[in-house]
Each structure stands twice: as structure tokens, then as C-alpha cells.
Image (cartoon, grey):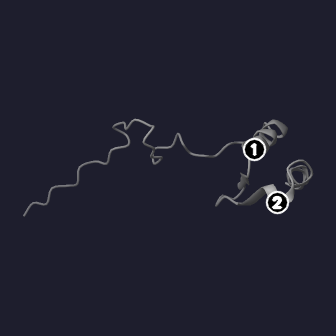
Amino acid sequence: MNDILGWLREHVGSEDFANHGAGLVDGTAFHFRTIEAAGAFLMAFPDLELADYTTGPSYNSPQRPASSIDRPAAPPKIPW
């Protein structure tokens, strides 16, 4: 992690990125002010895993067509 932070400070600048815990044991989220900085970061560290979860069943977007997996099951019928 120190290598990554050192690279970011040198090549992106401390004012143009942020990082914080991603709610995972071994995860960190990185945020960039420009797409160019994000692209340079990805080129410098190609083995890092992108964990955006856009392929997960709970992801919702108007650009993603709904599938039967995304639709909730009908609620159970109450017998009274």
C-alpha cells in the first residue's frame, strides 16, 4: 500500500486523489479528480481488482435491463 500511495503522491498529487477503506478486510477505495489520473493509476497498477460490483444482483441502473433475477419474488399469501 505504501508503494501505491507514494506513486499517487508523486504522479497524481496529494490534492487530486483520495483513498479510504472500502468496508472490506483487504479493500481500499480510490477516488480521482480526473479521468486521466484514474487511467494512469490503472496503467501503473494493472493487477489491482476493480470492485465496483456492477455485475452483482443488487446493482441497479437505468442502462441495465432488468432480468428475472433482479425482480423480487411475490410476497407470500396470507391465509386469512
Q: Please report the residue visible at 90 percent of the width from the left and 49 percent of the height from the top.
A: 7
Q: Is residue 58 left or right of residue 12?
A: left
Label drawn at residue 38 = 1
Quadrant of the rendered image containing residue 43: top right
> Vertical placement of 48 versus 28: above or below?
above
Q: Is residue 52 left or right of residue 10?
A: left
The spot of residue 22 in percent (x, y) is 66, 58
Quadrant of the rendered image containing residue 62: top left
> Vertical placement of 6 versus 69: above or below?
below
Q: Please report the residue visible at 13 percent of the width from the left and 60 percent of the height from the top.
A: 78
Q: Residues within 10 Å of mark 1 (few under 14, many from 20)?
A: some
- Closer to us: mark 2 or mark 1? 2
SS category of the residue bearing label 2: helix
> Vertical placement of 69 versus 18: above or below?
above
Q: Please report the residue visible at 81 percent of the width from the left and 40 percent of the height from the top.
A: 40
Q: How many marks?
A: 2
The spot of residue 28 in percent (x, y) is 72, 55
Q: Please report the residue visible at 23 percent of the width from the left and 49 percent of the height from the top.
A: 74
Label drawn at residue 15 = 2
Mark 1 belongs to which amino acid?
Ala
- Extreme bottom residue here? 80
Mark 2 belongs to which amino acid?
Glu
The spot of residue 47 in percent (x, y) is 78, 38
- Quadrant of the image for the C terminus? bottom left
SS category of the residue bearing label 1: helix
> Vertical placement of 70 versus 76: above or below?
above
